[in-house]
Image (cartoon, helix red, strand yellow):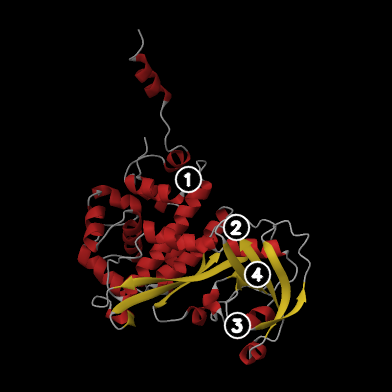
Amino acid sequence: MVKLSLFSQITSVIPRNLFSIIVDKYQGDKYTKGIDSWTHFISMLFCQLGQANSVRDISNGLRSITGNIYHLGCQRSPSKSTISYVNEHRNFRIFQEFYYSLFSYLKQQTHFAKPALHQLRRKVYLLDASTISLSLSLYDWAKFRTRKGAVKLHMLLDYDGCLPAFADLTHGNIHEIQIARKMNLPNDSIVVFDMGYYDFAWWKNLDSRNIWFVTRAKDNLDYQVVERFDITDEKNKGVMEDCNIRLNSVKGREEYPNMLRLVRFWDEKNQNLLVFLTNNRYWTASTVAAIYKERWQIESFFKMIKQNLRIKSFVGTSENAVQIQIWTALITMLLLTYLKIKAKYAWHMSNLITFIRLNLFVKIDLWQWINEPFFRPKEIISTQLSLFSG
């Protein structure tokens, strides 16, 4: 008989020694009042997996499991006032840095595969940002507009596994390109982004590091065609034009004097004309279109975490508390992705999150359940059938 809850078994996947190293680095437990960093982390993980709406829900939920709290590596259940205090005062960078450490650790334990684009040998990254609205009366530090508060989650998604390779939470009025300029993108990689990242000087910097990019062209882009390519051999009939261009504007010529490649593509499914820009001259025009199409993965990721995890409503109002909740949401998503990949059953992520929440404190074997969530023992089935026998 299994003696540990599903929640305890999920947390056992986490290398606690890595967490302890980071806690020591930031002296997270030096001035501990109430609960240590691990109990704090477990509390916020429960907030995500258990869909807790407040610190009261977190406290009551963990108190309700009585002695099983020790199986989670915690000495006692936290009170709501203690959770509020540590969310405000414990350095959120503990959770931020632990996300990256856990990401590296789990990448060594399994293979995070590409959803598509298997022909590409370079690493592919998807870049975007999403705004999270906040009440200005409660989050006065997050002023966005006159009567509105907001924070912005900037994210660079690693296409292998579709998980954040970089994330940053800023005030809502910080433009996406300001954060993109600070990102340390790996040389010889591919980055895909939308029209919110129009910065010709940044594009030139990508060129200098041999980073290929794919983006959408603005309708008012001022350019001249240098060379047109024959598209008769293109397998995808949606390709309408493929050419090399140079920017015409004074600022464009100064900041990006190199040639760009423009691909005009008709999206038959959505009846939409799309115009792409890239600094790559080796791919087919169809490949350029296919690469940009995969940008929906990052939009899907934002939608997934907003709908299934706690990142739109917060259990604390300080900036530090919001940061902690965002980073524990990303850690939760990392753990769930790892479980989904390792499972033999073909889970949809939203179903996996729902089923885990419903069975969080049930004492069943994690891997047996995740591999066969609808398994019915043969002896039970045979007993049921015998009721209808003569």
Check disc 4: other Cα within 10 Å, few if <14, some if 14-19, many if 20+. Answer: some
Check disc 3: other Cα within 10 Å, few if <14, some if 14-19, many if 20+. Answer: some
Q: Quadrant of residue 173?
A: bottom left
Tell me whether the residue at label 2 lies in contact with that at label 4, contact meaning CB atoms closer than 8 angstroms.
no
- The residue wearing badge 4 is 189
- The residue wearing badge 2 is 268
Q: Quadrant of residue 382?
A: top left
Q: In the rendered view, does 317 fall on the left or right side of 306?
A: left
**Mark 1 or 4 closer to N-term?**
4
Q: Identify the residue shown where x is 50% and y is 53%.
A: 338
Which amino acid type corresponds to the residue marked 4 in the rendered image? Ser
Given this view, does label 2 or label 4 mark the residue nearer the observer?
2
Given this view, does label 4 or label 3 mark the residue nearer the observer?
3
Q: Is residue 15 above or below residue 98?
A: above
**Mark 3 or 2 closer to N-term?**
3
Q: Is residue 209 above or below residue 6?
A: below
- For the C terminus, give its image quadrant: top left
Q: Is residue 107 above or below residue 95?
A: above
Tell me whether the residue at label 3 lies in contact with that at label 2, contact meaning CB atoms closer than 8 angstroms.
no
Which amino acid type corresponds to the residue marked 1 in the rendered image? Trp
Q: In 3D space, how far apart are the residues under numbered discs 3 and 1 (Cα atoms)?
A: 39 Å
- The residue wearing badge 1 is 347
Q: In the rendered view, does 16 fall on the left or right side of 70?
A: right
- For the N terminus, give its image quadrant: top left
**Mark 3 or 1 closer to N-term?**
3
Q: Is residue 182 above or below residue 156?
A: below
**Mark 2 or 1 closer to N-term?**
2
Residue 158 is situated, as x and y percent measured from the top left of the image, at 56, 64
Tell me whether the residue at label 2 lies in contact with that at label 1, contact meaning CB atoms closer than 8 angstroms.
no
